[in-house]
Amino acid sequence: MGLKSISSSLSKNDLAHLGEGEIGYIRKMRSEEVSRCFPEAPEMGPGIDLWALFGADGTPILLTDNRSSTFFKAAEDDLRTVTLH
């Protein structure tokens, strides 16, 4: 059984908007990383495990210490979720 190759090219702009408004990704992060993605977040002590929800384009949506909250927010915003490892 051979594999079929599909040749399709996406522009950088098309790729940047792929999944926009439809897909959100969930990522576990440490408090030391928060200011990079959520500059408006208050200062936190080191070593805290947190969960973040981002739009497909990387836009930060939610930061929480409760993983379940990310799924509830994604459902509220009609986003299908994927987990980033």
Image (tube, rainbow, N blue to C red):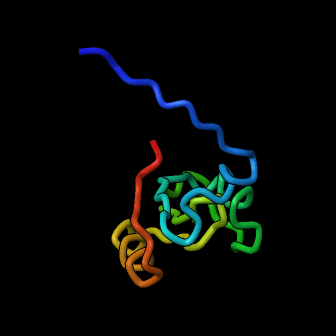
Instruction: Pick the residue in front: 63 or 59.
Output: 59
Q: Determine the residue located farthest toward the top in the rendered image.
A: 1
Residue 43 picture quarter = bottom right
Callout count = 0
Q: Quadrant of the N terminus?
A: top left
Q: Position of residue 5 (x, y in %)?
A: 45, 25
When asked about the image quadrant of residue 81, the answer is bottom left
Quadrant in which residue 40 is drawn: bottom right
**At 44% from the left edge and 72% from the top edge, which residue is drawn?**
79
In the displayed structure, does residue 43 sit left or right of residue 2?
A: right
Whole-percent x and y of residue 12? Answer: 75, 46
Which residue is depicted at the point 75% across and 53% down?
Answer: 13
Q: x, y percentage for residue 78?
A: 43, 78
| Furthest residue in direction bottom, as rendered | 76
From the viewer's perspective, tell me whether residue 5 is left or right of residue 2: right
- Say if 76 sits above or below 22 in the image: below
Quarter of the image with the C terminus is top left
- 12 vs 23: above or below: above
Q: Residue at x 49, y 69 (%)?
A: 22
Q: Position of residue 34 (x, y in %)?
A: 66, 59
- Depth check, front residue: 13 or 31: 13
- Classify residue 13 as left or right of residue 26: right
Q: Nearer the viewer, residue 44 or 56?
A: 56
